[in-house]
Image (cartoon, rainbow, N blue to C red):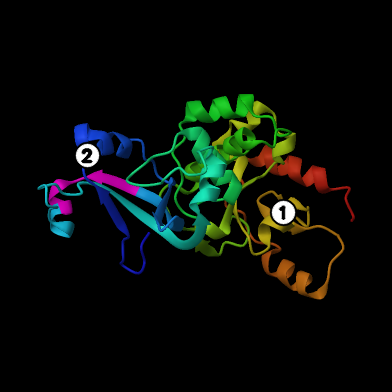
Amino acid sequence: MYPSGLVPTWGVTAGVNNVNANKWRKIQPADVTFFSANKVLYSYGFVTFKIHNKLLAQHLWEFNSKGETWEYIYFLDELREHDIPISLFNEIVGYSENFKVQGFSVLDEDKSDALLSYFDLESETAVQPVSEEEYRDIIESFDINILDIEGKTKSRAEQGFLRKALFGNKTIDGCGICGKEYPISFLIAAHIKKRSFCSNEEKLDYRNIVMPMCKFGCDDLFEKGYITVNEGIISVNDKTTTIPLKIYLSHIEGMHCGYWNVDTIKYFDWHRNHHSLSKV
């Protein structure tokens, strides 16, 4: 997860009456952490893991003047600089214009969703935990036509669940079409049968309905029907193409798809039949 060997680490003290500790307990993987100073949110990163470890905190930071250490620890990744005025932050989450952001705070779900949606923030590697029961509730209540914050939140949660089911704790995996390995940020949890045509029962078959496809061409080619899978072998359809595209297709045509099996064959067959009449 940290190829450079550097692990961005932050911690907080327990606080008066454990106020900080209680806030810390609400933190989950893939949550966004913002850092502020001088009326600006100047940096943010994504939480990967958290741990309560007083000895580690003592080793890293020793103690403050009150004899406390920052023992409620969380680790970050994908740190980025960002110049967000506090006034804009307050407007997005519904605080008063002059609200002062200070100390250690954890936003509630509605405020967090508003902020994530406004800036379109999403981790490339960390995945927020979603249980199978929560995933089922999302599928059964999700309306693709609802594009508000709630709809976007459910969509993120659905994708997060599928990516966790597909990649687990891996940071690198292979594309199910070309077989090349990439960091998972370059792989999509792609539906074999188009999601919009799936029944709820099929969407809930998450172990078989999705497979990893790379963003370097395979996902688009499969989505647009340029390639299909027949009896486990990747076939190329007769569609409008160019020389560079033909070269790319020639490299994957005839390859074996490791995700074709007795449980996924019906989805691959649907995909092949769906695109069999398209010549555009």
Mark 2 secondary-structure assignment = loop
Q: Please report the residue visible at 73 percent of the width from the left and 37 percent of the height from the top.
A: 196
Q: Residue 35: image x %, image y %?
A: 39, 54
Q: Please report the residue visible at 64 percent of the width from the left and 64 percent of the height from the top.
A: 216
Residue 247 in view of the camera: yes
Q: Residue 57: image x %, image y %?
A: 17, 52
Residue furthest to the left: 67
Other residues around mark 2 within 10 Å, as few (<14) / some (14–19) / many (≥20): some
Q: Amino acid at mark 1?
A: Phe
Other residues around mark 1 within 10 Å, as few (<14) / some (14–19) / many (≥20): many
Comparing 217 with 256, the one in front is 217
Mark 1 secondary-structure assignment = helix
Q: Amino acid at mark 2?
A: Gly
| Residue 115 located left or right of residue 235 | left
Q: Is residue 260 above or below residue 183?
A: above
Tell me which corner region of the image, top left, top right, bottom left or bottom right, holds residue 246: bottom right
Region in magenta:
49-57
Residue furthest to the front: 98
Q: Which residue is mark 1?
A: 222
Marks 2 and 1, how far apart in space?
53 Å
Q: Is residue 88 above or below residue 3?
A: above
Q: Please report the residue visible at 77 percent of the width from the left and 46 percent of the height from the top.
A: 272
Q: Is residue 140 above or below residue 270?
A: above
Q: Residue 123: image x %, image y %?
A: 49, 52
Comparing 132 with 20, the one in front is 20
Q: Which residue is mark 2?
A: 15
Q: Residue 259: image x %, image y %?
A: 58, 48
